[in-house]
Image (cartoon, coloured by chain):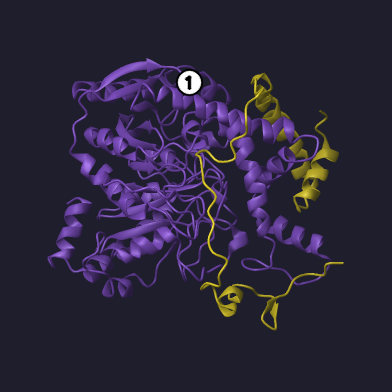
Chain colours: A purple, B yellow
Amino acid sequence: MNTIEFIQKIRNGEIDPAENIARVMEEISKLNKEYNHFNMIADDAEKQAKNINLKGRLAGLPVSVKDCICVKGMESRSGSKILSGYKPVFDATAVRKVREEGGIIIGKTSQDEFGFGSFSSNMGEGFETPLNPVDKKRACGGSSGGSGGITAKISFPHISLGESTGGSIASPASFCGVTGLCPTYGRVSRYGLIDYGNSLDKIGPMAKSVSGAALMLEIIAGHDKNESTSLDKPVDAYTDYLQKDIKGMRIGVIREAFGEGIDDEVSEKVKDAISRLEDMGAKTEEVSLPLTMKYGIPAYYLISTSEASTNLAKFCGMRYGKTEELEDGFNKYFSKVRSSNLGEEAKRRIMLGTFARMAGYRDAYYIKALKVRSMIIKEYKKVFKKFDLLASPTMPSIAPKFSDIEKLSPLQQYMMDVLTVGPNIAGLPHLSVNAGELKGMPVGMMMVGDHLEEKKLVQAGGKLE
Amino acid sequence: MNIDTSLIENVASLARLELKDPEKKKFVEDFKEILKAFSELDNADVKDVKMSVQPIEMQDSMREDLKEESLSQKEALKNAKHKKDGYFKGPRAV
């Protein structure tokens, strides 16, 4: 039974939401002991189920939420020890919309601390690492690893709210074999999102199918007066595009994304999927994105760490989260709380971002990266004059083993984002769908659309299921 | 540019982080590797290129300067351990 059929059965009384959610909670509690896809599981899900909007477009649907998205009364830590005990007094706008449509919040999914990672292996102190649903020796991808993992593993209809800064929806979707839809920057309100990079962060759905992701995006997208960067543009009926054919759709196949550094077998699987789109009438042609592929990683990491270094300044042991005894002056106090509660990668990115904005280095790093970002956006915009969508593998490989990740330096880990940083830095919507299997592990294919063209991603992505 | 312990200590101080000696040593090595790779950006010709602080064109969002509903004082203080008389209580400023 797919998500849309399930919701229909709840709405017409064939399934009791409270009975269903009791079974869901039993399953996820059991799974979590083995896979660590949740940082915390809701203790009020059955109570929520008794008071839902039974006519809502998500009536009775279990929804998991990445830990960085605030849920009222539910500990929301963004995977960091420094936010231990923080229980938001409000719902993020995306969560509020889910509740209004009858969705039931089942828990907070695990992630790299503050989203700082590509594998969900940079966990904050005291957090368990989520394990890949297909092979527990491998990573879920990151940073929305728990969302990807539980979406693949759960046997009930369910959708997760993930979040992407540089590829954090697409990567776990690829490694776990599910659908991840990262919308245009500003399409979904960031109100209530614990930010990483405020000009890059996007909340988006992860689901077993494109139809589930399309349905969720229809609900969470839209302008929000509480969030000044949310776009005041009409929201498309994305689910209507599932049925539309793709005859004549122009798809650009990114040349550099099938070359050096990308696993040959992964490339082959994705090429097969592209052929299937051709068989259905899409017209494909090779396209080159030289600036994006060359400068994407440094530009992304300099901008995102610069933003993170200011956004994370608020975690200083005063208004929420971990504290210490109030002694010494403020500099010493803030430093003490931060140093003992932030993990290694969080410190590294705060350091890099602070450096990139320092007097004497700012022009060469931060400002330069913002200018290069303009060049990258321009390169994409030019390509979208000719193409509806662009296609590539999502990640350069299948999900790596933890034993191999340990051998990578921080820079080598950053390089894994080579295919996803482009659309993220340019704020472009992108979709990762499963394109097949390699050694039993899922292979993701990514499609990128022009700003606010999520509907085309749904239209083409749905054809591959 | 000389990436050494003294640079790392300066950055850490600005970032309000106290690093232990092994952390400093590790960050020196990481910074060397990362910044060398990122120096690729030196090759980008950005003459006459403007910055993009947002990826998509945004319009200023203004509203009337009127009192609106917001969190109550009690709600705002709910997650704070250190508070007094309805205010957050912080460390000494001087």
Q: Chain of mark 1?
A: A
In front: A229, or A361? Answer: A229
In front: B54, or A9? Answer: B54
The answer to whether residue A154 is above or below residue A406 is below
Left or right, residue A55 beside residue B41: left
SS under mark 1 = loop
User: In terms of image quadrants, where is residue A367?
Assistant: top right
Residue plotted at (51% across, 68% down) = A88
Residue plotted at (27% across, 68% down) = A22
In front: A74, or A234? Answer: A234
Disc 1 residue crowd, few under 14, some 14–19, many 20+, Cα 10 Å? some
Q: Position of residue A139 (x, y in %)?
A: 45, 41
Q: Which residue position is annotated with label 1?
A: A289
Q: Position of residue A116 (x, y in %)?
A: 57, 45
Q: Residue furthest front?
A: B64
Query: Total label count?
Result: 1
Q: Position of residue A315 (x, y in %)?
A: 66, 59
The answer to whether residue A140 is above or below residue A274 is below
Determine if residue A33 is in view: no
Residue plotted at (69% across, 75% down) = B82
The answer to whether residue A401 is above or below residue A235 is above
Q: Residue furthest bottom?
A: B85
Residue type marked 1? Leu
Q: Position of residue A120 (x, y in %)?
A: 50, 45
In front: B61, or A458? Answer: B61
User: In terms of image quadrants, where is residue B52?
Assistant: top right
Determine if residue A127 is in view: yes
